[in-house]
Image: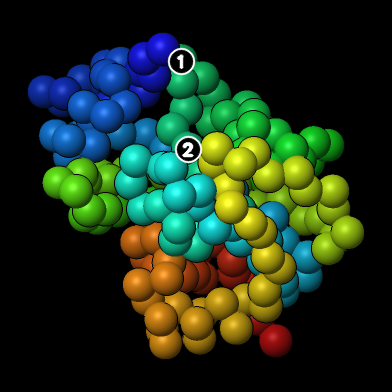
Amino acid sequence: MTSLIPAWVDGHLTPVEKLEVHQRGLKHKAVSVFVMDGQNVLIQQRASGKYHTPNLWANTCCTHPDWNEDSADCAVRRLKQELGITGLYPAHRDTVEYRADVGNGLIEHEVVDIFLAEATADLPVQPNPDEVQKTQWIGFYDLSAEITRHPDYFTPWLRIYLQEYSDRIFGSLVRA
């Protein structure tokens, strides 16, 4: 099954196969979700079988919307597909753009709709083993410190979100 995602080709948004998008480094739409419990963030370690950035820690979940799929619907869908999380309806926080080498000749050049959802640490989470190895709740400031100490443990996009867009994404949610 081929996954067609929205990408810009010659200045026009068009459906393109996901692997081709990354091989060509095309700018494309994406969705990232952060589930928060106060100042704690639910993060995931990507499955070892992922075709890029396997075994690295990332935000709660992320994906590319299907062609003609609404970003908010995509966020809800992906929470369920990756983590078995239902009943949350994340709020849109911002849209950011970044470009990063993700290894093996693949490039992420994403225009990302970022969503936040509030939950509690006892939220039922059932990771899909094809997507996620494990999950962990971590304090926002501890996560930022870990990224500074061990950047290679984390996906490029999570590093970029926290280092460049933290105020735009989290704002007063993580201020003392």
Q: Earlier in the sequence, mark 2 or mark 1?
A: 2
Residue 63's tag is 2
Q: Which mark is residue 76?
A: none
Q: Picture coordinates of residue 113 (x, y %)?
A: 48, 43
Which one is in front, 57 or 34? 57
Look at the image and tell me in which quarter the N terminus lies.
top left
Q: Where does label 1 land, which residue?
A: 68
Q: Is residue 62 left or right of residue 16?
A: right
Mark 1 crowdedness (10 Å alpha carbons): few <14, some 14-19, many ≥20: few
**Does residue 165 show up?**
no
Residue at the limit of the structure toward the left, as seen here: 10
At numbered mark 2, what does the secondary structure look like: helix, strand or loop? strand
Q: Residue at coordinates 44% horizontally, 61% vertically from top-left?
A: 56
In the rendered image, residue 58, in percent from the top left (x then y), is placed at: 50, 58
| Circle 1: residue type | Asn
Q: Residues within 10 Å of mark 2 (few under 14, many from 20)?
A: some
From the image, state whether disc 2 or disc 1 is nearer to you: 2
- The residue positioned 20% from the left and 44% from the top of the image is 106
Relative to 115, does residue 169 appear above or below in the rendering? below
Q: Residue 56 vs residue 80: left or right?
A: left
